Image: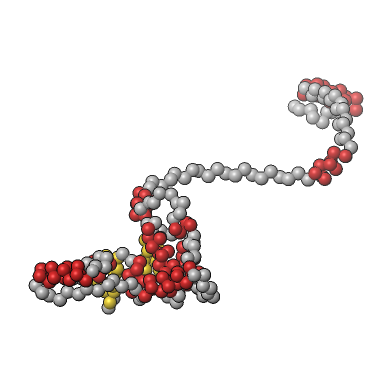
């Protein structure tokens, strides 16, 4: 279950690139098949999946290209079909033939290859396929089990159901790299928050007495104009004559 949860966490945002390390380790045969079917479904949607595993049968079931490392170096790389093909032999697959027809075909082949050994056998399936076939037949017979069951549904968005037209992931990467940066609009300063009005204070101010009118201003009395110096001198001399003395500011 931890392995299943880890895979769910890796796929929750539907990434374009998925790196899996031993994704089927510790799973039962049914769980292994479901994981591999999920990987194939993601690959059909154009996802890029890098699988690292020592379980070579799993690699053979889901990978189209393989890299083999040994001693820290790449020892083999290429499409899986080309790496596993034996170029010096050939296999014919046909429906079951009668014994007479089989002997005729073998005689023609022996004549063409100079009497070399020719074998006839039946195609075989791997043990996983046989196991799943037995389980499916048991399920069809309504056999109950407390263990794992097959046929569980994968999320629609992972299977690509209802998705838009398939897009090459490399094209999406190129579009992101060549896209012109969007012009950033200048930020509009936020309006200052309006102060909140204290309704209680506003009501209290409205209940206060109206302000008293200002007292009427009295008209200003114009100041007497200053007397010129000559009048002051005459008044001083007259005052001094009355007092019997000389004026104090008399100038020679």
Left or right of 251? Residue 3 is left
Q: Position of residue 72 (x, y in %)?
A: 28, 76
What's the residue at 66%, 45% (across, down)?
193
Q: Position of residue 150 (x, y in %)?
A: 47, 68
87 or 225, which is in the foreground?
A: 87
132 or 215, which is in the foreground?
A: 132
102 or 215, which is in the foreground?
A: 102
Left or right of 114? Residue 81 is right
Asked whether the viewer can see residue 156, the reply is yes
Q: Position of residue 111 (x, y in %)?
A: 10, 70
What's the residue at 82%, 45% (across, down)?
200
The picture quadrant where one finds residue 25 is bottom left
The picture quadrant where one finds residue 118 is bottom left
Left or right of 237? Residue 27 is left
Asked whether the viewer can see residue 4, the reply is no
Q: Position of residue 145 (x, y in %)?
A: 53, 74
Q: Is residue 209 above or below residue 146?
A: above
The picture quadrant where one finds residue 104 is bottom left
What's the residue at 48%, 62% (across, down)?
154
39 or 73, which is in the foreground?
A: 39
Name the outermost residue toward the bottom.
Answer: 71
């Amino acid at each position: 279950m931890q392995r299943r949860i880890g895979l769910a966490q890796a796929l929750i945002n539907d990434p374009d690139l998925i790196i899996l390390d031993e994704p089927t380790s510790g799973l039962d045969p049914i769980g292994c098949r479901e994981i591999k079917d999920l990987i194939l479904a993601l690959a059909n949607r154009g996802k890029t999946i890098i699988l690292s595993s020592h379980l070579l049968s799993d690699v053979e079931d889901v990978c189209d290209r393989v890299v083999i490392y040994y001693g820290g170096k790449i020892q083999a790389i290429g499409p899986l079909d080309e790496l596993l093909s034996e170029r010096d032999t050939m296999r014919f697959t046909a429906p079951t033939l009668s014994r007479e027809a089989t002997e005729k075909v073998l005689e023609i082949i022996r004549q063409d290859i100079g009497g070399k050994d020719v074998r006839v056998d039946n195609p075989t399936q791997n043990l996983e396929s046989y196991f799943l076939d037995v389980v499916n037949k048991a399920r069809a017979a309504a056999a109950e089990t407390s263990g794992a069951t097959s046929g569980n549904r994968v999320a629609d968005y992972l299977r690509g159901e209802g998705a838009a037209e398939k897009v090459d992931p490399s094209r999406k990467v190129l579009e992101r790299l060549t896209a012109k940066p969007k012009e950033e609009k200048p930020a509009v300063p936020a309006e200052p928050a309006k102060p909140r009005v204290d309704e209680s204070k506003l009501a209290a101010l409205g209940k206060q007495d109206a302000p008293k009118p200002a007292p009427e201003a009295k008209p200003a009395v114009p100041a007497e104009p200053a007397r010129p110096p000559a009048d002051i001198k005459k008044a001083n001399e007259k005052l001094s004559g009355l007092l019997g003395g000389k004026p104090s500011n008399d100038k020679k």
